Amino acid sequence: MPRAADQLAPSGAGMNGMEPPPDIFDAQALDLEFWLRPRTIEVVRPASKERAKLLYWKDGEIIESAYQDLCHLLRDVNGGNETRTIDPKLFETLWGTQAFVQRYGIDAPLEILSGYRTPASNQKLREAGVPAARQSLHMVGRAADIRIATLNAEVLGGLVKSFRQGGVGFYYRAGPRGGWIHADTGLQRTWKG
């Protein structure tokens, strides 16, 4: 099986026929110890140039102040900076993704391209031709568009999908940092946008 490091490529690189094997990251193979350890997540918001590394869960409980900081980081930076409570299950997926790739020596912050969106902000995206669902889970704090700069978008999406916690959208764009993954806590489904 290829090593994870062999799969590192700019987002969208898998589009030229070199697709990663579906089992490169198998989240279902994780042991219970992985899910019981303290959870520190490192995120960056390119749109606001914010960065944080927060311990938000320990000994089976959410650390409220860190959780509130994460909700603030996922605010609608394009729609008046409105903040909303974010589904804790979404943070589980985001943390699990980052913690899992760290096992392979990929120690990079999780880029949050979009978190919560107000209905007005979501509508503006739709009008601008950006793929945004009419009933987007972004509008209820249950979705995030993410990227890990050094990880191929197909591999990242495959990992998020392997957690089986909700929907996964694969969005490919030209350029070294053009792709991203939509992760949500809705019904399990997959699509390409």
Image: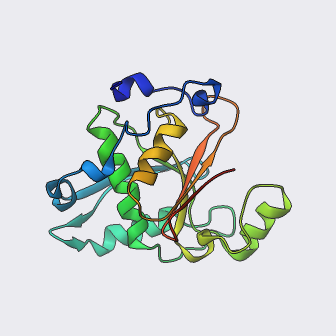
Q: Quick check: 119 left or right of 28?
A: right
Name the spot of residue 27 as percent of width and height, x first. 32, 50
Residue at image position (62%, 40%) is 179
Query: Residue 88 is drawn in which quadrant?
Result: bottom left
Instruction: Answer left or right for 65 relative to 71.
Output: left
Q: Locate the N terminus by quadrant.
A: top left
For residue 99, above or below residue 176: below
Residue 180: give x, y in percent of width and height. 59, 45
104 shown above or below 158: above
Give the percent coordinates (x, y) of residue 186: 52, 71
Q: Answer left or right for 157 relative to 30.
A: right
Image point 18% across, 53% down: which residue? 31
In the rendering, at what x and y percent does residue 59 appear? 14, 68
Could you say which is closer to the camera, residue 86 or residue 31?
31
- Residue drawn at (38%, 56%), measured in percent from left and top? 163
Q: Residue 108 is drawn in which quadrant?
A: top left
Residue closest to the eye, 110 or 164: 164
Report whether 53 appears left or right of 178: left
Q: Could you tell me which residue is drawn at 34 percent across and 40 percent down?
A: 101
Q: How many marks?
A: 0
Q: What sort of colour scheme is used for the picture?
A: rainbow
**Front in this rendered view, residue 177 or 25:** 25
